[in-house]
Image: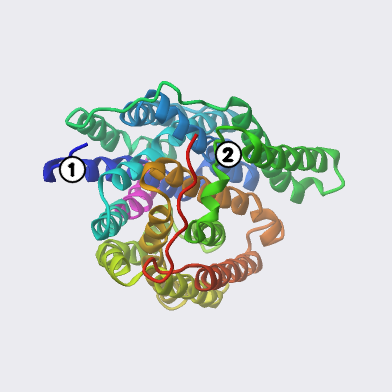
Amino acid sequence: MADPSARELRLVLWIAILASFVSFLDGTVVNVALPAIENDLGGGITTQQWTVDAYLITLGSLILVAGAVSDAFGRIRVLRWGLIGFGLTSVAIALAPTAEFLIGARLAQGVAGALLVPSSLALITSNYSGPSQGKAIGTWTAATSGAMVAGPVIGGLFVDLASWRWVFLINVVPIGICVWLLTRLEQRDVRHPEAHVDILSALLCAGGLAGMVYALIEQPHLGWSDPEVWVTGLAGTAAFVAFIWRQAVVARPMLPLSLFARRNFAWGNLATFLIYGALSLNGFVLTVYLQEGAGFSATAAGLASLPLTLMMIALSSRVGALSGKYGPRLFMTVGPLLMGAGSLMLLAVGGTVNYWTQVLPGITVFGLGLTLMVSPLTSAILSAAPRERAGIASATNNAISRVAGLIAVAMVGAVVGGTLDLDGFHQAMIVIAALMVAGGVVSWLGIRNPSTEPEPASAPTS
């Protein structure tokens, strides 16, 4: 296939940015809207946890299936399905009459997100290569970080001035633009008639995650001795173990374990699990506590993380280029360590919260670390995989980051001691810092810059 033209490359990058923007936007507006959703629909912190985790359960378990679906039906077509499905389920969430309906719609939205998320980044990795790939991923990171600005601020304004329901309709415009841009692509969609969708693996993965998450969310209320907790927890664990075993023995696995023989892929995904689990826990706890514990309005809570996002927009592209030149190891080590330091600085938050002296310094250090880490981590993992496996490599890394967030949010009750008061907030910050430091240590020990250690030859594909 001929190299893509400059116009085509720009178009691919914009499509990847807008498609990912939708998912990032949803994640940020949800956290800001959680207290208002609970006030309207009831259910306490459990409703808040399930509002986040219902989406992550189906997203995390089906992202890997989406790779096979893309092979069978075409990446561009599946991306279009994901965009349309995401828009329709967003409308359903906005109209939700009960917490149960909202959670069901979030489950369906996760299915659409699974079709949407990995395909967007795979478009970049399949069209860009070498140093230009690192720079493109950095640009993608900087641009999609705009969602982290728009989501909390616009979402907070809607919550304060109108209703939380409007925050789920924000993504309609980028979805419409992205669907139109897809029609402008010159490259043909590629379909593989022999592609296989492993339904049993998908069921084992989804069932396993659902069982474990249900147990973690309900444990603080029911206790480990309650059969509803330990039976679902054990059943979920057994199903997930069966899923991993099946990936080792089935002819065409959803999750090719052979990819983990590549050092940067294996260690990078371990770092992803630790860092993104901590990142999700931080987003949930900080946004909810600033509203429910510190008395911030939804808009003020959304604006609280603005410095972090502005740093990402300003510096991510540059960091991506530097990582492509010097290698990802140092960035992936220093970034999480700074994020851990920023979390510990948030222990300064007291009974009466002063944003400028107690919150802003920690968020600034945390944001600097996040900016240093994101682009190099993504580039290190995706460049470790063969180019022809870019889709499944992206899907695997997305799945691991989402599952990490899923488990972290499910454990909020246990981490904060059942109540997100000041003591619970401090406990959460200590746990977040510990996970971040562990992610930095794992990166230093495991990641190798591409020029210093060549990756093994890829395993033959079936």
**Mark on residue 57?**
2
Residue 200 shown left or right of residue 27 in the figure: right
- Residue placed at 67% from the left, 57% from the top? 419
On the question of residue 39 being in view, the answer is: no
- Secondary element type, mark 2: helix
Q: Position of residue 122 (x, y in %)?
A: 35, 43
Residue 189 shown left or right of residue 237 in the figure: left
Residue matched to label 1? 3
Q: Quadrant of the N terminus?
A: top left
Magenta region's main secondary structure? helix
- Secondary element type, mark 1: loop
Residue nearer the viewer, 462 or 322: 462
> Gap between marks 1 and 2, in whole Å?
38 Å
Q: Is residue 51 above or below residue 203?
A: below
Could you tell me the amino acid type at mark 1? Asp
The residue range painted magenta reads 145-162
- Residue placed at 57% from the left, 42% from the top? 53
Could you tell me the amino acid type at mark 2? Ile
- Residue placed at 54% from the left, 67% from the top? 439
Q: Position of residue 382 (x, y in %)?
A: 40, 53
Going from N to C along the chain, the mark reached first, 1 or 2, is 1
Question: How many labels sit on residues?
Answer: 2
- Residue placed at 51% from the left, 45% from the top? 399
Is residue 156 within the magenta segment?
yes
Q: Residues within 10 Å of mark 1 (few under 14, many from 20)?
A: few
On the question of residue 395 being in view, the answer is: yes
Q: Position of residue 235 (x, y in %)?
A: 77, 37
Quarter of the figure with residue 278? bottom right
Residue 135 shown left or right of residue 431 in the figure: left
Which dot, 1 or 2, sits closer to the camera?
Answer: 1
Q: Residues within 10 Å of mark 2 (few under 14, many from 20)?
A: many
